Image (spheres, rainbow, N blue to C red):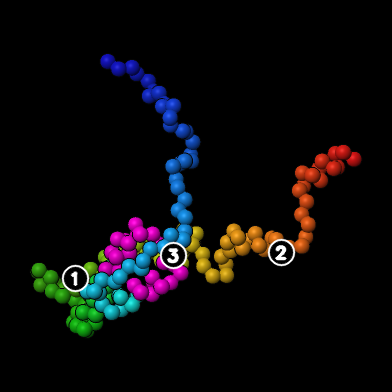
Amino acid sequence: MSKRGRIPKQNELKTGHRDNNIQVLRGGAEFPKPIAKHQWLAATKRNWKNYWNSELSSTAQPVDLPAFYRLFQFYDEVERANRLVLKMGNKGLLSVGSQGQPKVNPLIDLTIKLESSILKLEQELGLTPLARQRLGIAFGEAQIGFKQLQEFLKEDEIETVDPRLLLDQLEEE
């Protein structure tokens, strides 16, 4: 029989709430712009190109490409389903169920399911304003880099004094 009681902690394990294995990704590692799939609609290809030509694409990593391809595939499928429903007009909104009852067109059901998947992927990839804010992605005038902050402080003519030195001077007097 084995001992009863708590399992002893291993010495190698660090306790606490911080994960010391987290690595910070460095920006600036560029990779070639991925090519849109040839079977996509022209609108989807245009959106793909617009994304990869935007500043936001600089946050993407090569490991994210499958998620981006999946997202744009979903965009393409939604666009195709919407075009079909529009082409059918009012008749395209309802279809006949197995028991003869009126039922929502399966294309509309598919679109609704795809839209929820699209939203999840957009949030994970930082493609909505709120998702960018949560992920800490800022662009434009609001963004100030560390080097810019250093230059700004160097331009400042005001002489700064270490408050600890002031305290030492006061104690000596």
Find out whether the residues at labels 1 and 2 contact each other: C-beta distance under 8 Å: no
- For the residues marked 1 and 2, what is the alpha-carbon distance in whole angstroms? 64 Å
* Predominant SS of the magenta segment: helix
Q: Amino acid at mark 2?
A: Glu
Name the image quarter holding the N terminus: top left
Quick one: label 1 or label 3, which is nearer the N terminus? Answer: 3
What is the span of residues highlighted in magenta in the rendered image? Answer: 48-73
- For the residues marked 2 and 3, what is the alpha-carbon distance in whole angstroms? 30 Å
Depth check, front residue: 104 or 117: 117
- Residue 79, percent across and down? 27, 76
| Residue in the picture at 49% in, 36% down | 16
- Residue 50, percent across and down? 38, 75
Find out whether the residues at labels 2 and 3 contact each other: C-beta distance under 8 Å: no
Name the image quarter holding the C terminus: top right
Vertical placement of 39 versus 149: above or below?
A: below
Mark 1 against mark 3, which lies toward the viewer? 3
Vertical placement of 106 versus 5: above or below?
A: below
Marks counted in the figure total: 3
Which mark, by number, is residue 106?
A: 1
Which mark, by number, is residue 155?
A: 2
In the rendered image, the residue lying farthest to the right is 173
Find out whether the residues at labels 1 and 3 contact each other: C-beta distance under 8 Å: no
